[in-house]
């Protein structure tokens, strides 16, 4: 029993590694730009899709918009940048970065003892479209709300780092 418990602790620690990596990389971004994110309501129609091994159990599907908003607020608190959610299609200022974000696909690729949740995100800004895939690896147990938050946060990190790279 002790060995099973130790194995579970190790797997859970490893499962958090990809999210911890995103947190560390996000904290290192130096960017003086202000970001405004708007949620595309068509994202509400996306459902979790499953590939690979069968998944045991089924947690409730999260409120995708609230998870999206939370990911921006948490990233804002973890960085020195200004990241804001706005419930509008209008750009607050000409000197800011405004992106309307749509979640286009949510899929869990499950293995025997681990899986990867991938979310395809479309960032639309000034006639330009940027497609990114947020990812997070999970081991053993997870819930949809927690893992979706981490994946969307990873996608925002990828977007911000692409806008702030030298």
Image: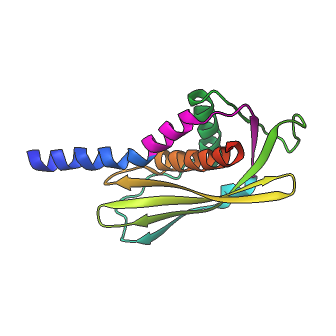
Left or right of 49 on screen, residue 81: right
- Residue 95 visible in the displayed image: yes
From the viewer's perspective, tell me whether residue 91 is left or right of residue 28: right
User: What's the magenta region?
Assistant: 19-40
- At 59% from the left and 35% from the top, the residue drawn is 75
Q: Position of residue 10 (x, y in %)?
A: 24, 46
Specify whether residue 25 is painted magenta: yes
Residue 164 placement (x, y as % from top left): 69, 42
Q: Position of residue 107 (x, y in %)?
A: 52, 64
Which quadrant holds residue 139?
A: bottom left
Relative to 65, residue 75 above or below: above
Query: Image quadrant for the C terminus?
Result: top right
Residue at 52% x, 40% y is: 25
**Front position in the image: 72 or 23:** 23
Where in the figure is residue 153, as x and y percent of width and height?
A: 57, 44
**Nearer the observer, 95 or 16:** 95
Name the residue at the front extreme: 166
């Amino acid at each position: 029993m002790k060995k099973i418990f130790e194995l579970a602790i190790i797997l859970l620690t490893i499962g958090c590694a990809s999210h911890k990596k995103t947190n560390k990389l996000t904290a290192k971004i130096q960017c003086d730009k202000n970001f405004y994110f708007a949620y595309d309501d068509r994202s509400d129609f996306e459902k979790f899709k499953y590939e690979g091994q069968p998944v045991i159990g089924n947690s409730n599907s999260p409120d995708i918009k609230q998870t999206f908003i939370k990911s921006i607020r948490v990233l804002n608190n973890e960085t020195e940048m200004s990241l804001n959610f706005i419930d509008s299609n209008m750009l607050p200022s000409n000197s800011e970065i405004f992106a309307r974000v749509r979640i286009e696909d949510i899929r869990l690729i499950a293995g025997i003892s681990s899986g990867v949740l991938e979310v395809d995100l479309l960032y639309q800004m000034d006639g330009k479209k940027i497609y990114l895939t947020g990812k997070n690896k999970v081991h053993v147990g997870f819930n949809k709300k927690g893992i979706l938050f981490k994946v969307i946060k990873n996608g925002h990190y990828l977007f911000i780092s692409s806008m702030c790279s030298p």
